[in-house]
Image (cartoon, rainbow, N blue to C red):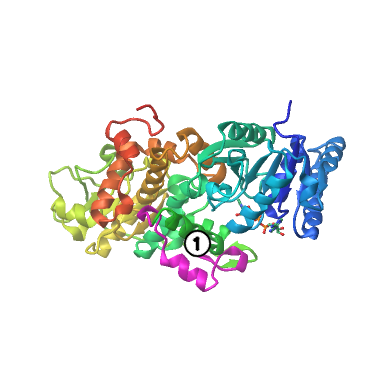
């Protein structure tokens, strides 16, 4: 195998630099590590050497391989030592001026054919390249932490980057065992942009008082299959990192409502309640373990009322079958009898609106989220409206929990929890495709590898049905009058004519 780059310099020996150095040396390149703090280089080499020793002890690497890797990871004492490198990867402090001046210095030292790349996660690649004589030889190469385990890298073309440079960087990524994805130089690139929907929509739901943090986490884990709920994820990444990312992308996109931050994270950050690393975030931690509040118990209901299901309910036949399986006494009249528990299952609309539009008695009306196939979910989610009587809420809760499946009861919200969060994720991803930031395939790859979602955002949209997602968004926009829910043209067109969200030909 011919290496795309056989002599590589890594500048900045922190968390990212050492990881990139490790995988480049493993690929077979000679790697020079440089940092303004000489002790940082030593610490980084020691840490990487230790990793390799551990892998050798576990029998995952041979002694020869480890000796070879170690011989290829070298310490540089000055930028001059890097003169004959073919590739320089910068992973220093996230400051535009410092990065620009480093690259200007490097251009003077390295051969004109050398490729220079930045690992920036929040700065513009084009802006860093602006002062360079050879911006065609410059690109973004955005890795994720920890680099050896997060096997995806975004290759970002600035305005003037040569396409051949991106291709060569992609080839090198593969040689290092990573999957490259190609992105245009836009705020957040692919992964940090696509990731905006999950946490920000969950924060909106909390700020409306619809459900608490733990309930939202449970719903999204159990209904959609996210490994971590949004608030567990916030606690892990910590708000001193994620709140700034949320704000940066919002402002870089000139206050686009889809990315609007929330005062909840601003206030928690100001109060130092930033996450697991300080022992308290959305959850409190004892010995590193989150203290989860207990689930509300299933109410005991002795006198179960008959049940009537709205003819306009989503997945109505499935809902009726489910109620039959749960042993409900189902009414078949055109309208509910005076004592019936009335079940509605809207997409995007709130329970109040549905009760009013369908002329139902709100005191007896409860909603269920039927976007998701009941057989495929570990939890059912019900919603009341402000007039729902306690006995009707308890009856619905007890009925839907009869087979032992978990049930959460939330307050009235357009689109429940899952509909809102899924629709927001799908909508943001669709708009990234509309803007041609990357190909739909690369978007899916980047998000599944970079964020560990159960499905890529477009596959998620296809799974729940582009038309259903579109309906959720249209109705959310009506309920909230908020531009954040306006559907991307990409989703609107494909949803309207029942096409896959991956469909690119136009
Ligand atoms: P870090 O703080 O762990 O390491 C930065 C290193 O750069 C330090 O050792 C510092 O001494 C050195 N340094 C600072 N200025 C320098 C200069 N002018 N010349 C040479 N060395 C210099 O930072 P980390 O987390 O490794 O981040 C580095 C870059 O990677 C940043 O641009 C960051 O935004 C980006 N990034 C970070 C990720 C993360 O999760 N930590 C993920 C993806 C990108």
- Quarter of the picture containing the N terminus is top right
Residue bearing the label numbered 1: 243
Q: Position of residue 340 (x, y in %)?
A: 19, 53
Q: Position of residue 380 (x, y in %)?
A: 38, 49
Q: Nearer the viewer, residue 151 or 320?
A: 151
Left or right: residue 405 versus residue 454 is left
The answer to whether 196 is drawn above or below residue 276 in the figure is above
- Ligand 1 rendered quadrant: bottom right
Left or right: residue 349 versus residue 18 is left
Q: Nearer the viewer, residue 47 or 123?
A: 123
- Quarter of the picture containing the C terminus is top left
- Check if residue 149 falls in the magenta segment: no
Left or right: residue 389 versus residue 135 is left
The answer to which quarter of the image holds residue 375 is top left
Label 1's element?
helix
Left or right: residue 99 versus residue 183 is right
- Check if residue 262 falls in the magenta segment: yes
Q: Position of residue 86 (x, y in %)?
A: 72, 37
Residue at 43% x, 56% y: name it.
Answer: 250
Range of magenta residues? 255-283
């Amino acid at each position: 195998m011919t290496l795309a780059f056989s002599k590589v310099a890594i500048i900045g020996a922190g968390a990212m630099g050492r990881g990139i150095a490790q995988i480049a040396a493993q690929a077979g390149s000679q790697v020079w590590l440089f940092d303004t703090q000489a002790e940082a280089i030593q610490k980084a080499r020691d840490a990487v050497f230790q990793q390799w020793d551990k892998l050798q002890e576990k029998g995952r690497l041979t002694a020869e391989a480890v000796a070879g890797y170690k011989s290829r990871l070298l310490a540089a004492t000055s930028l001059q030592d890097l003169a004959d490198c073919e590739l320089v990867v910068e992973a220093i402090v996230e400051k535009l001026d410092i990065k620009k001046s480093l690259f200007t210095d490097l251009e003077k030292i390295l051969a004109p054919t050398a490729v220079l790349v930045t690992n920036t996660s929040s700065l513009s690649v084009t802006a860093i390249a602006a002062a360079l004589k050879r911006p065609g030889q410059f690109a973004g190469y955005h890795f994720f932490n920890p680099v050896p385990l997060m096997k995806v890298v975004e290759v970002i073309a600035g305005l003037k980057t040569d396409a051949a440079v991106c291709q060569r960087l992609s080839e090198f990524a593969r040689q290092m065992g990573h999957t490259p994805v190609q992105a245009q130089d836009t705020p957040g690139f692919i992964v940090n942009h696509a990731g905006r929907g999950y946490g920000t929509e969950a924060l909106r739901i909390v700020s409306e008082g619809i459900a608490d943090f733990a309930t939202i986490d449970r719903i999204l884990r159990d209904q959609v299959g996210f490994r971590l709920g949004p608030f567990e994820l916030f606690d892990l990444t910590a708000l001193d990192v994620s709140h700034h990312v949320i704000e940066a992308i919002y402002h870089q996109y000139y206050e686009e409502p889809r990315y609007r931050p929330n005062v909840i994270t601003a206030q928690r950050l100001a109060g130092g309640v930033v996450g697991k690393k300080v022992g308290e975030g959305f959850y409190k931690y004892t010995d590193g373990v989150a203290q989860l509040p207990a689930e509300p118990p299933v109410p005991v209901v002795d006198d179960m009322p008959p049940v009537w299901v709205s003819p306009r309910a989503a997945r109505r036949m499935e809902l009726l079958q489910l109620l039959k399986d749960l042993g409900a006494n189902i009414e078949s009249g055109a309208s509910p009898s005076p004592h019936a528990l009335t079940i509605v299952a809207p997409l995007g609309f709130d329970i109040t609106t549905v009760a009013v539009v369908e002329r139902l008695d709100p005191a007896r009306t409860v909603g269920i989220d039927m976007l998701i196939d009941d057989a495929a979910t570990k939890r059912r989610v019900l919603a009341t409206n402000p007039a729902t009587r306690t006995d009707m809420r308890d009856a619905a809760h007890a009925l839907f929990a009869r087979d032992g499946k978990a049930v959460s009861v939330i307050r009235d919200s357009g689109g429940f929890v899952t509909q809102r969060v899924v629709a927001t994720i799908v909508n943001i991803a669709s708009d990234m495709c509309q803007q041609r930031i990357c190909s739909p395939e690369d978007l899916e790859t980047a998000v599944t590898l970079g964020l560990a979602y159960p499905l890529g955002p477009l596959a998620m949209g296809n799974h729940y049905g582009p038309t259903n997602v579109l309906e959720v968004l249209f109705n959310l926009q009506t309920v909230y009058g908020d531009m954040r829910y306006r559907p991307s043209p990409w989703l609107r067109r494909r949803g309207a004519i029942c096409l896959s969200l991956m469909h690119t030909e136009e």
